[in-house]
Image: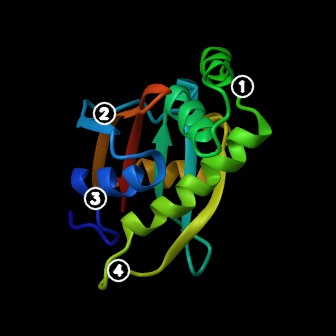
Amino acid sequence: MATIHPTPREIEVRQMLAMLFGNDLTISEIEAIPTDGDSGNVAAVFISDDDNPVTACVCDMKFAAFAGAALTRIPVGGAEDAAESGELTENMIGNLSEVMNICSRLFMSGNSPHLRLDKLYAKLADVPDNALAMLDSIAGRLDLKVSIPGYGEGQIAFLST
């Protein structure tokens, strides 16, 4: 099945994240991370201009905490505590939302419809049913392990329709 929104390529993700977190950032492709409500993962849902969910990023708590902290240099200890407890601070959530907003560009090309970040869900279990249904019908996927310099490793999945 062809995707409506392109699935980002590893090199594109690396370039985008390196602009945010530095050139020492490393990424590598991994097996699919869980995208079910019980996983404890975080989800960013992107919507079309008619407000329907069309793509998503799902990340584990480590990526969420480290990316959310690194953007504004929240101390690594706070990021590690958040990753371990599964509770992101308000600042981390706001920062991660900005990272996801920037990553929305990875799902667009000259031929794809426009999309935008709708909302970041600190728990995948809180994602609305229509967005969960969209996750079950993805046509493209890229799962990555990302090492954010000075913070640590986490995992993120880019899910395309």
Q: Earlier in the sequence, mark 4 or mark 1?
A: 1
Asked if disc 4 and disc 1 are in contact, CB closer than 8 Å, the reply is no
Can you identify the residue that label 4 sits on? 112
Residue type (three-letter) at the residue carrying disc 3: Glu
Whether residue 120 sits left or right of residue 110 in the image: it is right
Residue type (three-letter) at the residue carrying disc 2: Ala
Q: Which tag is nearer the camera, tag 1 or tag 2?
A: 1
Residue type (three-letter) at the residue carrying disc 1: Glu
Look at the numbered disc 1 and give the secondary structure of its residue. Answer: loop
Q: Earlier in the sequence, mark 1 or mark 2?
A: 2
Q: Position of residue 91 (x, y in %)?
A: 75, 42
Q: Earlier in the sequence, mark 3 or mark 4?
A: 3
Asked if disc 3 and disc 4 are in contact, CB closer than 8 Å, the reply is no
Look at the numbered disc 4 and give the secondary structure of its residue. Answer: loop
Can you identify the residue that label 3 sits on? 12
At 61% from the left edge and 14% from the top edge, which residue is drawn?
84
Q: Which tag is nearer the camera, tag 4 or tag 1?
A: 1
Q: Earlier in the sequence, mark 2 or mark 4?
A: 2
Residue type (three-letter) at the residue carrying disc 4: Ser
**Label 4, residues with CA under 10 Å away: few <14, some 14-19, many ≥20:** few
Whether residue 82 sits left or right of residue 155 in the image: it is right
Q: How far apart in space, not on screen, are marks 1 and 2 (Cα)?
A: 23 Å
Q: Position of residue 122 (x, y in %)?
A: 67, 38
Q: Earlier in the sequence, mark 3 or mark 1?
A: 3
At 32% from the left edge and 77% from the top edge, which residue is drawn?
109
Can you identify the residue that label 2 sits on? 32
